[in-house]
């Protein structure tokens, strides 16, 4: 795995983290003095920025010591300001080179005496793998994106009994901490108000037609899942498929057109929607659809949570791991 590549790298010559500081702290004795740090490069209009805020806001009501460390320079937006407002300190990295960023962030975390460090990005940002490998805080946790980075058996991965059922522990290096019901909780997603019937008619969708929706980006569109989508259209003659996602639209259309030809399905039963200018506008798509079709083998994250919030049923394929 990518995480294992970091394990093969030699440890720093002088590790500033003492053996004593690595010991697990007694959280029940810390109360409002607990210092919680977060590392991320996506605290903006991004899936992480949408799904992590409510959780962090609730933590800020338990302790005022919330620290955020950005692990890449990015253009801040209105979502970023929400995170700034709930933090004790919001560190913006001044570095550009990955190793320099990792070194800077680790030094800041140690200097701030962070008790619990929560990695929001996992291996979506390889800088995080280096930081979590060196464990600059006594308790290091990965949540909620992707999966455990596989860098330290002393670290933790927050999950639940649905994403990580009994018996999957052998697949992980990090220790699994399962929430009783769900590993992710949100207070909701803003969505523009629309007239469902009017918008369906605008797209040529009749009221008695079943509209399936696939809204994952192109890197999650496997040929197997595309074939399954056309199989569904074949078995439900009056249905249509709405495709919406980031990617080369002409290549995507060619793949669908080829599969429609093989399955003898009219290609005109597919509707390709352009990318929306805002997430609030995008979520209106969940309102006009009847059923959301998940991606696989890599399942959807925020897209699925948004679909549920909009009361849209989801069809997915269950595997052995998250």
Image (cartoon, helix red, strand yellow):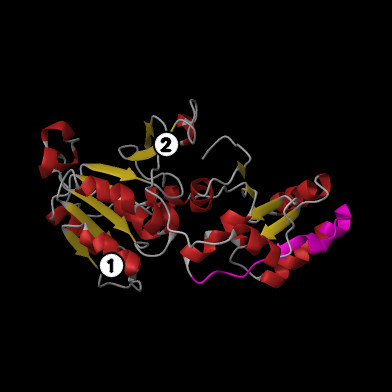
Depth check: 55 or 172 in front? 55
Mark 2 neighbour class, 10 Å CA radius: few under 14, some 14 to 19, many 20 or more: few
Identity of the residue drawn at 52% across and 59% down: 283
Query: Which quadrant would residue 246 be assigned to in this image?
Result: bottom right
Is residue 313 in view from this perspective? yes
Check residue 229 for magenta coloring. Answer: no
Q: What stretch is highlighted in magenta?
A: 260-277
Depth check: 218 or 105 in front? 218
The picture places residue 11, in percent across and down from the top left corner, at 29, 51
Residue that label 2 marks: 182
Q: How many marks?
A: 2
Residue that label 1 marks: 100
Identity of the residue drawn at 31% across and 40% down: 155
Depth check: 154 or 243 in front? 243
Identity of the residue drawn at 35% across and 45% down: 142
Q: In this view, does 182 lie above or below 48?
A: above
Is residue 14 in view from this perspective? no
N-terminal of the pair, mark 2 or mark 1, is: 1
Q: Is residue 244 left or right of residue 133?
A: right
Q: Marks 2/1: CA distance?
A: 36 Å
Identity of the residue drawn at 72% across and 54% down: 207
Q: In this view, does 104 lie to the left or right of 164?
A: left
Q: Is residue 107 above or below residue 315?
A: below
* Labelled disc at residue 245: none
């Amino acid at each position: 795995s990518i995480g294992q590549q970091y394990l093969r790298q030699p440890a720093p010559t002088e590790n500033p983290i003492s053996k004593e500081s690595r010991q697990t702290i007694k959280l029940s004795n810390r109360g409002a003095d607990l210092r919680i740090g977060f590392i991320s490069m996506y605290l903006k209009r991004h899936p992480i920025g949408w799904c992590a805020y409510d959780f962090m806001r609730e933590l800020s009501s338990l302790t005022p010591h919330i620290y955020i460390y950005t692990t890449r320079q990015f253009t801040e937006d209105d979502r970023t300001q929400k995170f700034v407002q709930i933090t004790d300190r919001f560190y913006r990295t001044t570095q550009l080179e990955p190793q320099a960023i990792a070194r800077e962030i680790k030094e800041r975390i140690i200097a701030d005496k962070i008790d619990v460090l929560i990695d929001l990005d996992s291996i979506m940002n390889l800088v995080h793998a280096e930081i979590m490998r060196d464990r600059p805080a006594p308790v290091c946790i990965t949540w909620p994106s992707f999966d455990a980075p596989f860098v330290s058996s002393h670290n933790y991965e927050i999950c639940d009994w649905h994403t990580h059922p009994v018996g999957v522990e052998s697949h992980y290096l990090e220790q699994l901490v399962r929430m009783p019901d769900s590993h992710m909780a949100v207070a909701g997603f803003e969505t523009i108000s629309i007239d469902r019937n009017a918008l369906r008619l605008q797209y040529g969708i009749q009221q008695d037609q079943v509209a399936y929706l696939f809204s994952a980006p192109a890197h999650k569109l496997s040929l197997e899942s595309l074939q399954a989508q056309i199989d569904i259209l074949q078995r439900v003659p009056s249905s249509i498929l709405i495709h919406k996602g980031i990617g080369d639209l002409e290549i995507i259309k060619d793949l669908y057109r080829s599969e429609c030809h093989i399955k003898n399905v009219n290609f005109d039963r597919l509707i390709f929607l352009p990318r929306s200018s805002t997430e609030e506008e995008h979520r209106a798509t969940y309102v006009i659809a009847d059923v959301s079709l998940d991606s696989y083998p890599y399942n959807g994250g925020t897209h699925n949570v948004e679909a549920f919030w909009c009361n849209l049923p989801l069809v997915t394929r269950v595997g052995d791991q998250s």
